[in-house]
Image: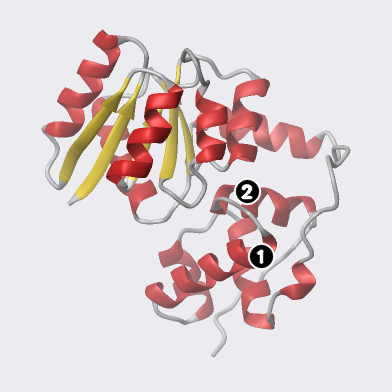
Amino acid sequence: MIRVLVADDQSAVRAGLVLILGAAPGIEVAGEAADGVQAVALARDLRPDVVLMDVRMPRLDGISATRELAGVADVLVLTTFDTDEYVFGALRAGAAGFLLKDVDADRLIEAVRTVAAGEGIIAPAVTRRLIDAFAAGPREPAGPPPDPGELTPRERQVFACLGEGLSNGEIAARLDMAETTAKTHVSRILAKLGLRSRVQAAILARELGATGPRETRP
């Protein structure tokens, strides 16, 4: 059972999300939050698998709340706004996914399951924006970048696969390993590089030009 905390300051929107998720097989709504402060407190208390997080909320915005929940729960940001400030802010804060509120119910349910499985998911319009940002050239770093030199050779292969946007299952198939092993490698990579989500790892891998093997290896 996937336990989800729904955080949105609009009661009608929150009720709709709760209705959609509560009716989905294998998903349980563990709680509701009307602002960022409440979302952080409830997430720390209830320990849900996924927090469905709005961006614009009183007292504490969704991006700041996402940053505070690193290591507590995977955050799937769901917002009406897809400005660069929100997109990059959410991903830097450690969000595992970013979707727009015009997403249909089936896609939302699929996204929650994807994030709960340890994968990342980004709305197609946002994906195009990220690609455009990379194509425009490197950005000025805010601080020293993580050092991939700390990774083992196998972890570097997995890191490169993350840069290609591969799921755990696809990484396992590419590198001829069990999917659980791929997931373990991803967790270790995030810990070693001080990253909050596989989306951050994918962005870093692309910025560094990491490339992975094109054939399976023992």
Query: Along the horizontal axis of the image, is 108 left or right of 161?
Result: left
Q: Which mark is residue 9?
A: none
In front here: 44 or 119?
A: 44
Residue 148 in view of the camera: yes
What residue is shown at x 50% (from left), y 25% (from top)?
Answer: 62
What residue is shown at x 67% (from left), y 22% (from top)?
Answer: 84
What residue is shown at x 47% (from left), y 72% (from top)?
Answer: 184
The amino acid type, in three-letter code, at marker 1 is Ala
Query: Along the horizontal axis of the image, is 56 left or right of 12?
Result: right
- Residue that carries the numbered disc 2 in the rendered image: 200
| Position of 153 relative to 47 (above/below) | below
- Dividing the picture into quadrants, the one containing residue 132 is top right
The mark total stands at 2
Label located before the other in sequence (2 or 1) = 1
Gap between marks 2 and 1, in whole Å? 13 Å
Residue with the most extreme right position: 140
As helix, strand or loop, the secondary structure at mark 1 comes to helix
The answer to whether mark 2 and mark 1 are in CB contact below 8 A is no
Whole-percent x and y of residue 101? 39, 19
As helix, strand or loop, the secondary structure at mark 2 comes to helix
| Position of 180 relative to 46 (above/below) | below
- Dividing the picture into quadrants, the one containing residue 94 is top right
Q: Which mark is residue 160?
A: 1
Residue 213 in view of the camera: no
Whole-percent x and y of residue 110? 29, 41
In front here: 84 or 65?
A: 65
Is label 2 or label 1 in front? 2
In front here: 145 or 58?
A: 58
Residue with the most extreme bottom position: 218
